[in-house]
Amino acid sequence: MDTALRDVVERLRERIPSPPAVGVILGSGLGDFAELVEDAVAIPYADIPSFPASAVVGHAGKLVAGRVKGVPVAVLAGRVHFYEGHPMSSVVFPARVLGLLGCRDVIVTNAAGGIDKKLRAGDLMLIEDHINLFGTNPLVGPNPDKLGPRFPDMSDAYKKELRALAAAAARRVGVPVKSGVYVGVHGPSYETPAEIRAFRALGAHAVGMSTVPEVIALNQMGIGVVGISCITNMAAGVLPQKLDHSEVLETTARVKDRFVKLLVALCEALGTGRTGDVLESPSRKEAHPVGHDPKRRVAAPKRSPKRKPAPTSKPKARR
Ligand code: HPA
């Protein structure tokens, strides 16, 4: 395995309180959830070797480990994007770290433009599948066999079982969610109206400039993914107005309470509502040595012996 990856995981293990069961990647303007983490240890990306730093407004740039509703979590507040000029290996590096730290599932969030005319700015959309229009793939190049297969299956990238669990969690806390297909594009220019019409014809409901690379890397590692898009604006040409990043930030600010509520419910559901409840396991490490998927091929690096074990402790609204 990549030695940079291994080194970072070893170092982080020394600093975070218990192995995370659930990872969360927060998109543009969606960083507030990180403030809710209890017993939090916050590590700025700048202090983590090999972690790429984002320069985009609305991306805080820290890893926060702790607990949400008793579930051990690791939250990436801020991500880097391919359009910033980082290579794909750097774009997916933090997601791979989450996997190697022991996350069984990762919630990947983003801000997205609504393509489907039934969506509205402010809606939350559970991602049911994606279309990769980045023009490349994070797995291009030599394949570190320890991370996963050369040709990973992507036919259930956002697992049906996890989507059902997420939809049930959303209903339980009264947060309306829609469901749809996310198309990931390179950016950073927004799309033209003709591109948006083409994406609609392809079957996409929302468009954004992130998520797809991380989801591919996580699938390769056999890690469960839940994807949530915050529809921050209607995509180009849907409404008679121009697109502006300030609208993205304004909408995320307006939606953040609902969004945070949903994430808390999701963390709880992923930690307690699945086979192999992480709170019931005397040691999560024993219960889930390398994630939930028995076929998963990632070898979690050996833990330091001095560490203690973790304490015991679809609404298809449219279409
Ligand atoms: N297009 C691409 N990415 C986005 C958009 C959009 O309209 N809104 C938020 N991220």
Image (cartoon, helix red, strand yellow):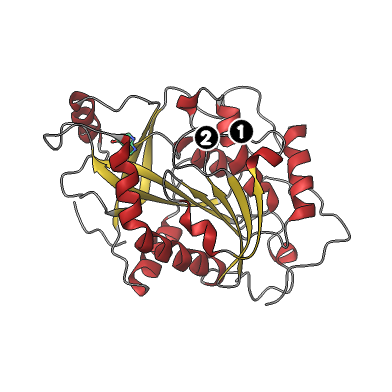
Instruction: Tell me: 156 left or right of 314.
Output: right
Ligand 1 within 8 Å of disc 2? The answer is no
**Residue 138 on image: x %, y %:** 54, 29
The answer to whether marks 1 and 2 mark residues whose Cβ atoms lie closer than 8 Å is yes
Kindly report the distance in space between the C-alpha atoms of the residues bearing marks 1 and 2.
Answer: 7 Å
Give the structural element (helix, strand or loop) at label 1: loop
Query: Vertical placement of 240 versus 25: above or below?
Result: above
Kindly identify the residue that appears in the image at 30 percent across and 60 percent down: 177
Write down the quadrant of residue 131 in the picture: top left
Q: Residue at x 68, y 73 (%)?
A: 281
Where does residue 270 sit, x and y in percent of width and height? 52, 65
- Along the viewing direction, whichever of 157 and 283 lies nearer the viewer: 283
Question: What residue appears at the point 65 percent right and 36 percent down from the top-left corner?
Answer: 51
Q: Is residue 180 visible?
A: no
Residue 146, by quadrant, is top right
- Front in this rendered view, residue 75 or 101: 75
Which image quarter holds the N terminus?
Answer: top right
The amino acid marked with disc number 2 is Val
Residue position for label 2: 80
Position of 103 with respect to 304 (left or right) is: left
Q: Nearer the viewer, residue 275 or 138?
A: 138
Q: Residue furthest right?
A: 305
Q: Which residue is label 1 attached to? A: 52
Residue 286 falls in which quadrant of the image? Answer: bottom right
Mark closer to the chain start, 1 or 2:
1
Q: Position of 183 compared to 89: left or right?
A: left
